[in-house]
Amino acid sequence: MPLLLLVAGSAVVAGAARRTPVPAPLLLVAAGLAVSYVPGVPDYTLDPEVVLPLLLPPLLYTSAADSSYLDLRAQLRPVALLSVGYALFATFVVGWAAYLIVPGLPLTAALVLGAVVAPPDAVAATAVARRVGLPSRITTILQGESLLNDATAITAYKVALAAAVGEGATWSGGVEEFLVAAVGGVGVGLVLMAPLHWLRTHLKEALLQNTLSLLIPFVAYGVAEQVHASGVLAVVTVALYLGHRAWEVDFATRLQEEAVWKMVAFVLESAVFALIGLQLPVVLRGLEEYAGAAAAWYAIAVFLVVVATRFVWVYPATFMPRLLRRVREREENPTWRGAMVTAWAGMRGVVSLAIAFSIPLTVHGGGPFPQRNLILFLTFTTVIGTLVVQGLTLPPLIRLLKFPGHDAQAATLAEANAQAQASRVAEQRLEELLTDERNALPPPLADRLRSVLERRRNAVWERLGQTNPVTGESVDDTYRRLSRDMIGAERAVFVRLRDGRYIDDEMLRTLLRRLDLEEAAAYREAA
């Protein structure tokens, strides 16, 4: 029952957030914080055995599958500098700062805290990037960083934790573990991606293909973790490959898969941010031995260090590589505005909390883990601080910096040119097919095929710069509205015939599905 309430409540809040200018993640966290103090609400403790293997793989998969492999490859250097370089840099700087700020906190435990709060969250970065409409290059870099940095942070956490609990970790051992996890994770992904793609293209039913699609992230993550490799990198590798070759899967699978994964991502993202807010009572209960003012000072100090550390890394990592001629020749010139947004878009999320909750209660020898409850508290306040402060101020910052907006005219022109080239090839193929006696069609049906191609080719060109002088509607909106009204009239007739028992429910479902597909096609043509 608590799980059902969590999913239902978070979905309601996320749906309501779409009608407000406030990003959904912030409303969900705020709602979770408020609900956590309602009498009778059960504790929702983040179990890392659930969050990491059950929530992280599907969220990473859907984000990676929607990303562009070609764009990520083009931005590989800045993505690597952030996902690997910055994550390790933040681990050491935040850890060292916490060691100096918090009296009695061992350096090894402080480095555990640094690794926990090092990675910006994939869900938060993607959600905010979609909402504010960042330039494509910055969005690609942020998405690429958030897809890969979890692997770096989790590995750094394991090394720091081994030292903290007394397992005798060494620098060379840490580097070796990092390389094994990274190379192994990518290797598992490379081994799995081709067989999984073959299965997707050879299963004949869309339901089976989509069932496989839901299992893929868990399979990739589980296999990689079994061989002590990075499950995160395995999932991302497989998802990028399958997303890049999604065009080879039949249309019915793509239609269903898009709807299924949108629903899965919506439910999981909503529940994840609500869970962050619901952690407050659990975290505060373990903070009894610390004075309120001291704990607040530690929280503010660590939050400021986390924010400042990202600026310290991002600006040099953005502009110093430009000193190399090869980099200048291959990459476009970055701007200080892009670096500012990249530095400020460092929201932390549920992965940091899940890792923090996985810190053991004791070290080797049976003693308590040093200041574990304070580490949990500082992780929570850092996550909330970055989501609230940076999440709320990022949209106005982008507006203040006046990034060039999306050029809709240029995008429509590129779409029209692509459609024209495809239509010409399709027309040639149609005429070749119609010359074969085995493909003979009555002239009206052959003309219908030609008219479909012509309408598809002309529809994009007609959208360029045309609006209705009376209503101000674009031709897209008018086309979509008229199509929806016509189909709605047909749909009402079919329902009336069913109610009058002229047709049965099975025939009604068949007719309605046909109309649904036509409405979807009309919407896509206009959109």
Image (cartoon, grey):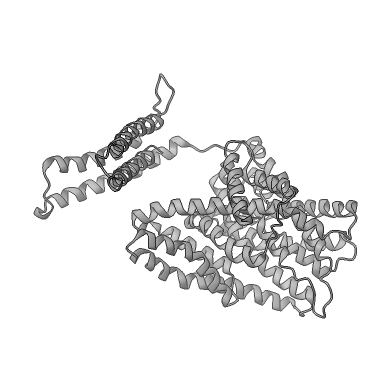
Identify the image quadrant of residue 131: top right
Name the residue at 48% across, 37% down.
Answer: 407
Name the residue at 56% across, 63% down.
Answer: 57
Outermost top residue: 470
Outermost left residue: 437
Above or below 522: residue 323: below
Above or below 359: residue 22: above
Percent of width and height locating residue 388: 71, 45
471 and 341: which one is in front? Answer: 471
- Give the tally of numbered discs: 0
434 on left or right of 113? left
Residue 84 at least partly seen: yes
Name the residue at 84% across, 65% down.
Answer: 371
Identify the image quadrant of residue 206: bottom left
Percent of width and height locating residue 426: 24, 48
Residue 86 at least partly seen: no
393 on left or right of 442? right
10 and 145: which one is in front? Answer: 10
Q: Quadrant of the C terminus?
A: top left
Q: Quadrant of the N terminus?
A: bottom right
Identify the image quadrant of residue 322: bottom right
42 and 103: which one is in front? Answer: 42
526 on left or right of 67? left
Percent of width and height locating residue 391: 67, 45
186 and 527: which one is in front? Answer: 527
Above or below 144: residue 128: above
Percent of width and height locating residue 428: 20, 48
